Image (cartoon, rainbow, N blue to C red):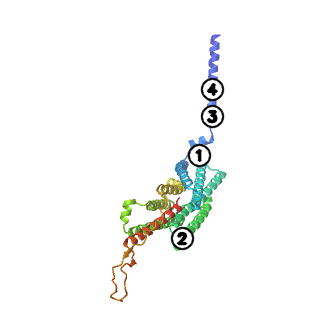
């Protein structure tokens, strides 16, 4: 009986082992399609996966930094007050819209990444959906570029409140940016349905040149205003004494920061232009395309925060000039030798002293400095 029982037990163990092996084989036969494709990636598919991952990770990381800076900039604007300043209200609306655009682009890139992970062999319906996402990304990118250039122009506009020529020139720059962005966006949407990618090559050169030219022009106008400020400051009689007493004026620091940040932003546009026109590695170009909206927003928010850190109450344009000094006329005696008119020894003739001239120069310099502070306050924060 015991021998029969052991034989039956052994056969049961063999049957159990056979069932387990059959179950494992069935699982291998019905492996999900996604796992099979992951195990059979071609070089082209792996390159596409690496490119998409680089885009998403670069864009997401840059977006995280931008989100923190955006919250800080919003806090600065709210602290300074929105209800009493139309300029701050417009600036707040613009940076909020740019942040929404960047958020939408980050969501779209993330969705594209998951779509790439789900299916490497794109079906026709799948490709149509991707083309729609690319159209949304193209429109948002061009809108963001126009808004960023508009803020750069606004910053220079505020420094020339009475110059019709400068305002006309800046207006033409903005119109050129809007036209070129619209045309380039239309071509990109048209070509995207065929190439299923963003537009690049020499055909995009004129678009980037317009954006770059607008930024260079606006930064150059700010630089000219800084040179004018330094020139007027140098004409003050005791400018060196003012510098020793006050240090470098904060309005001067603000102008320097605006100029330096403008040059950095122009250099970034040059890099993007060279990448799009003459081409870099596919991964490098796509990463630049992905982080471009965040860079535009980061540039503006950092500028707001830097100016807020250097901002000071605007000095009074007139502190009041002391009364005109009167110099005693020389004693002319009872009779003038030339015309015989009798003079009065107690008569006082008005005389403008040197101290009065210096005060006038200081007043003009302070008035110019005050106007710059007001302009920077309006255009930045």
Where's the N terminus, which quadrant?
top right
Query: Rounded to the nearest whole Å, what is the CA distance between mark 1 and mark 2?
Result: 50 Å
Query: Quick check: can you spot residue 59?
Result: no
Label 1–label 2 contact, CB within 8 A: no
**Distance of mark 1 from mark 4, alpha carbons?**
36 Å
- Residue located at (62% from left, 42% from top): 33
* Residue 363 shown left or right of residue 74 in the figure: left
Local secondary structure at mark 4: helix
Nearer to us of marks 1 and 4 is: 1
Residue position for label 4 = 18
Q: CA distance from mark 3 to mark 2?
A: 72 Å
Mark closest to the chain's N terminus, 4 or 3: 4
Label 4 environment density (alpha carbons within 10 Å; few <14, some 14–19, many ≥20): few
Q: Is residue 101 above or below residue 339?
A: above
Q: Nearer the viewer, mark 2 or mark 4?
A: 2
Q: Nearer the viewer, mark 3 or mark 2?
A: 2
Q: Is residue 104 at all visible to an observer of this figure?
A: yes
SS for dot 3: helix
**Residue 222 versus residue 294 in the image, above or below:** below
Q: Which residue in the protein does label 2 denote?
A: 167
Q: Badge 2 local density, few (<14 within 10 Å), some, or many (20+)?
A: some
- The quarter of the picture where residue 14 lies is top right
Circle 2/circle 4 CB separation < 8 Å:
no
Question: Which residue lies under the disc numbered 3?
Answer: 27
The front one of 110 and 119 is: 110
Give the secondary structure at mark 2.
Answer: helix
Upstream in sequence: badge 1 or badge 4: 4
Residue indicated by mark 1: 117
Q: Mark 3 vs mark 2: which is more N-terminal?
A: 3
| Residue at the image point whose x is 59% and y is 40% from the top | 35
Residue 251: image location, x then y, percent: 45, 61
């Amino acid at each position: 009986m015991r021998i029969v029982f052991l034989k039956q037990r052994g056969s049961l163990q063999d049957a159990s082992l056979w069932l387990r092996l059959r179950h494992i084989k069935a699982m291998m036969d019905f492996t999900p399609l996604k796992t099979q494709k992951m195990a059979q990636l071609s070089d082209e598919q792996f390159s596409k996966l690496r490119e998409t991952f680089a885009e998403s990770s670069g864009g997401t990381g840059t977006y995280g930094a931008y989100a923190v800076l955006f919250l800080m900039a919003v806090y600065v604007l709210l602290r300074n007050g929105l209800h009493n300043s139309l300029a701050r209200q417009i600036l707040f609306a613009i940076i909020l819209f740019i942040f929404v655009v960047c958020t939408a682009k980050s969501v779209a890139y993330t969705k594209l990444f998951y779509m790439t992970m789900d299916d490497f062999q794109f079906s026709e319906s799948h490709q149509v959906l991707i083309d729609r996402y690319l159209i949304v990304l193209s429109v948002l990118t061009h809108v963001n570029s126009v808004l960023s250039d508009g803020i750069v122009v606004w910053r220079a506009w505020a420094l020339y409140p009475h110059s019709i020529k400068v305002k006309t020139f800046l207006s033409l720059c903005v119109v050129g940016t809007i036209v070129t962005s619209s045309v380039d966006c239309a071509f990109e949407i048209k070509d995207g349905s065929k190439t299923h990618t963003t537009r690049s090559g020499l055909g995009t050169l004129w678009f980037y040149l317009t954006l770059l030219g607008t930024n260079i022009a606006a930064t150059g106008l700010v630089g000219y205003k800084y040179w004018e400020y330094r020139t007027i400051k140098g004409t003050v009689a005791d400018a060196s004494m003012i510098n020793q007493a006050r240090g470098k004026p904060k309005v001067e620091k603000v102008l320097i920061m605006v100029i330096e940040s403008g040059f950095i932003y122009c250099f970034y546009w040059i890099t993007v232009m060279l990448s799009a026109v003459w081409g870099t590695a596919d991964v490098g170009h796509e990463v630049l395309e992905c982080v471009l909206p965040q860079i535009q927003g980061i540039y503006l928010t950092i500028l707001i925060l830097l100016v807020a850190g250097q901002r000071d109450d605007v000095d009074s344009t007139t502190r009041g000039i002391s009364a005109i000094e009167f110099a005693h006329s020389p004693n002319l005696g009872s009779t003038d030798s030339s015309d015989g008119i009798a003079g009065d020894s107690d008569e006082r003739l008005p005389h403008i002293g040197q101290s009065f001239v210096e005060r006038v120069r200081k007043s003009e310099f302070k008035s110019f400095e005050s106007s710059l502070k007001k302009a920077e306050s309006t255009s930045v924060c």
